[in-house]
Amino acid sequence: MTDIAAVVRAFDFVARKHVAQRRKGKNEEPYINHLIEVAHLLAEATNGADTALVMAGALHDVIEDTDVTADELTASFGAEITALVLEVTDDKSLSYAERKRRQIETAPLISARAKLIKLADKTSNLRSLVASPPKLWDGARRREYARWSREVAVHCFGLNAMLDRVFEEAYRAAAKQAGLEAA
C-alpha cells in the first residue's frame, strides 16, 4: 500500500469511528476536523517523511473517545501506530483533573514521536479554543486550559522547530483572548 493510501485509510477509519462526535466549541465542528488538523501539522512538520506518525496523529483519539480497542487498532494499522496512539491516550476511567495531571507528569517520559503528536494536538486544541470557544467556558476556564496546555507542551519542545513555533503562536492567541498574559 502506498503512503497516501495508508493515510487516507486512517482518515476513513477515524471519520467512521468519530462520525457522530462534534467539537465542544460554539460552532460544533465535526470532530474529524481536529484529527485531520493534527495529522496535517505532523505531515508539515516532517515534510511528509513519517507516514506512521501522520497516521497516528489522525488516530490519536480513537481509543480514548470511541469503542475501538488497542487490538482492533493493531489489526487495522499495526503495532507501531497502536503504540504511538497508546502513548498519548488518556485513561478515561480517571477523573478529568487526574487525567490532566498525568499528562503533565508523563509528557517528559513519552517517545519523541509521541511528543510531536502531543504538541500538534495541543496546538489544534488551542486554535479551536480561539476560533470557537466552548459555550460554557468562561475566561477563567479558557485561561486554565491555555496554562495547562503549555505545561504539557514545554516537555515536548525542542524536537521540531515548526511545531514549537505554531504551538507558541496558538498559545499566545488563546492566552490573549482569555485575558492571560502570555509568558
Image: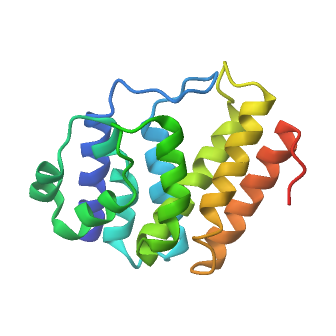
Q: Count every numbered label the image shows and give the total.
A: 0
Asked if residue 136 is positioned above or below residue 105 in the image, the reply reads above
**Is any atom of residue 183 visible in this view?**
yes
Instruction: Find residue 172 and report its horizontal and vertical position in percent.
Output: 81, 54
Please state the horizontal and vertical placement of residue 106, each as a whole percent of the image: 47, 64
Q: Residue at x 35, y 62 (%)?
A: 87
Q: Camera-side residue: 113 or 11?
A: 113
Does residue 109 appear to the left or right of 141 in the view shown?
left
* Residue drawn at (40%, 27%) of the image: 21
For the C terminus, the image quarter is bottom right
**145 shown above or below 85:** above
Task: Find residue 92 and report its horizontal and vertical position in percent.
Answer: 36, 38
Please give the name of the residue rendered at 36% of the width and 52% of the height, measured from the top-left corner.
89
Residue in the picture at 52% in, 30% down: 23
Q: Nearer the viewer, residue 141 or 13?
A: 141
What colour scheme was applied to this rendering of the protein?
Answer: rainbow
Q: Is residue 56 left or right of residue 78?
A: right
- Between 3 and 104, the one lying in front of the other is 104
Query: Dividing the picture into quarters, in which one does residue 133 lie?
Result: top right
Viewport quadrant of the N terminus = bottom left
- x%, y% of residue 3? 27, 69
Residue 43 can be seen in this image: no
Rendered position, 33 above or below 70: above
